[in-house]
Amino acid sequence: MDLKPQDLLVLLKVAANPSQRWTYAALGKALAMSASETHASVKRAVVSGLAVAPARGEWSPIRPNLLEFILHGVRYVWPATQGTVKRGVPTSIGMEPLAGRMMVAPGELSPLYKTAPQAALADPALHRLLALLDALRTGRARERALAAQLMEAELNQHGLESADANQ
């Protein structure tokens, strides 16, 4: 079972909102996907070791595995293609937390998944994770190093919030 880009979008949405309990329908609506698409994404994530499903209908990302995949695999599995500047959603170094730290010529990146821009606009926490992911997918060594550091901090921070909420 091969991972698909929407699987990572589903994982990042849940990782960005750890205190939220998601049904497949609600998660699908938030990501402009169907409930069956989100269910299939979760199944692929569990099989690949990026998520765990301890009980029927319950699941969560395995943060260390997700971080490892994001830092070392995503840019090879789903490389972003750059194009000319168009109207769109700010991402990568065009958005905080990287925008204030990097200076690069503008351009357009292909989104990880077709509904990612729409989902990012509706959720600032997801938008930050997707922007960092795009920097990891396209950036030079300096941008990738900074994005990796910030991605780890973001995922660890959200993981701590989730652990605190569960206690």
Image (tube, rainbow, N blue to C red):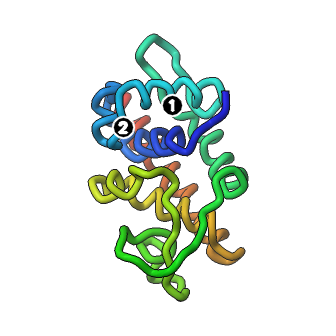
Instruction: Assign a secondary structure to mark 1.
Output: helix
Which amino acid, mark 2? Met
What is the x, y in percent for residue 65? 65, 39
**Residue that sits furthest to the top in the current view:** 56
Instruction: Assign a secondary structure to mark 2.
Output: loop
Dividing the image into 4 quarters, which one contains the C terminus?
Answer: top left
Q: Quadrant of residue 151?
A: bottom right
Residue 65 can be seen, yes or no: yes
Count of labels in the image: 2
Dividing the image into 4 quarters, which one contains the N terminus?
Answer: top right
Q: Residues within 10 Å of mark 1 (few under 14, many from 20)?
A: many
Q: Residues within 10 Å of mark 2 (few under 14, many from 20)?
A: some
In the picture of the structure, the residue carrying the numbered disc 1 is 41
The residue at the point 61 percent across, 71 percent down is 146
Which amino acid, mark 1? Ser
The residue at the point 67 percent across, 58 percent down is 75
In the picture of the structure, the residue carrying the numbered disc 2 is 33
Alpha carbon separation for disc pair 2 and 1? 10 Å
Residues at discs 2 and 1 in contact (Cβ within 8 Å):
yes
